[in-house]
Image: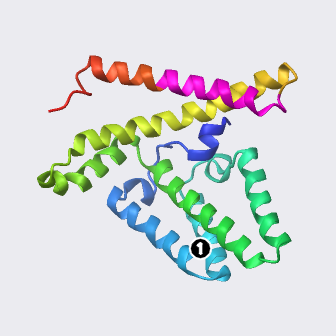
Amino acid sequence: MNAARALLGIHVPGTTVWHRMGVGWKYLVFLALTLPAVFGGPLVVLGALALTLALVATTRAPLRLAWGMPVALVVLFALVAGYHVFFGEPVMAVKVVGTTLAALYAGRLILITTPMPSLIDALVAAVGPLRRFGANPERFGLAVAVLVRSIPYVIASFGEVRDAARARGVDRNPLASVTPVVVQAVAYARTTGDALMARGLGDDD
């Protein structure tokens, strides 16, 4: 499973209650799962995380997709937790890592059960009332769509560049891994911007 899918999840068609639920209700479930973890103690955080994992499993998506995590992210969480434990703050370790994981899996609950166009349409509708203040909901939705599409690209670029650097024996050099990704990301952004401008989507109304 590639890193982008492992981090964000991917829509898996189905007929579960989550697939039939409206997007707005899913966002409310997301808040109900994450807010207690943000403001609660360690036991609340662990309980919220356990409940979130159980709910994600009910989407009937393959568990490797539903619960999977990129190795690099697992290492990062382990380092963060180890840092806090080393300095005598095990409660903070549970709070930071547990809350982040609960939010990540709660978000995956939405992404696995909702097609991306439906998510964007829901965001556009939510921003709609701000039109009277000069906001452009359609442009906002387009920006979110481009952002969501860009994340997997950047993640995949990191993986490709890391493998290439390892093959050349320079994987321990940060510049050898970061610089090509930055160059690719800038090129991708310019290409996307040119494509939008060619369609008149970047012009001011």
Q: Quarter of the image holding residue 54?
A: bottom right
Residue 50 picture location, percent across and down: 64, 70
Residue 35 picture location, percent across and down: 49, 73
Residue ID at (20%, 44%): 136
Q: Is residue 197 left or right of residue 84?
A: left
Q: What range of the chain is rendered magenta?
A: 171-188
Q: Residues within 10 Å of mark 1 (few under 14, many from 20)?
A: many
Where 159 sits versus 187, above or below? below
Where 157 sits versus 80, above or below? above
Residue 45 picture location, percent across and down: 63, 75
Residue ID at (61%, 51%): 66
Q: Main secondary structure of the magenta part?
A: helix
Position of the N terminus, as image quadrant, is: top right
Q: Is residue 116 left or right of residue 174?
A: left
Which residue is outermost to the left?
132
Where 29 sits versus 139, above or below? below
Residue labelled with disc 1: 48
Residue ID at (71%, 25%): 161
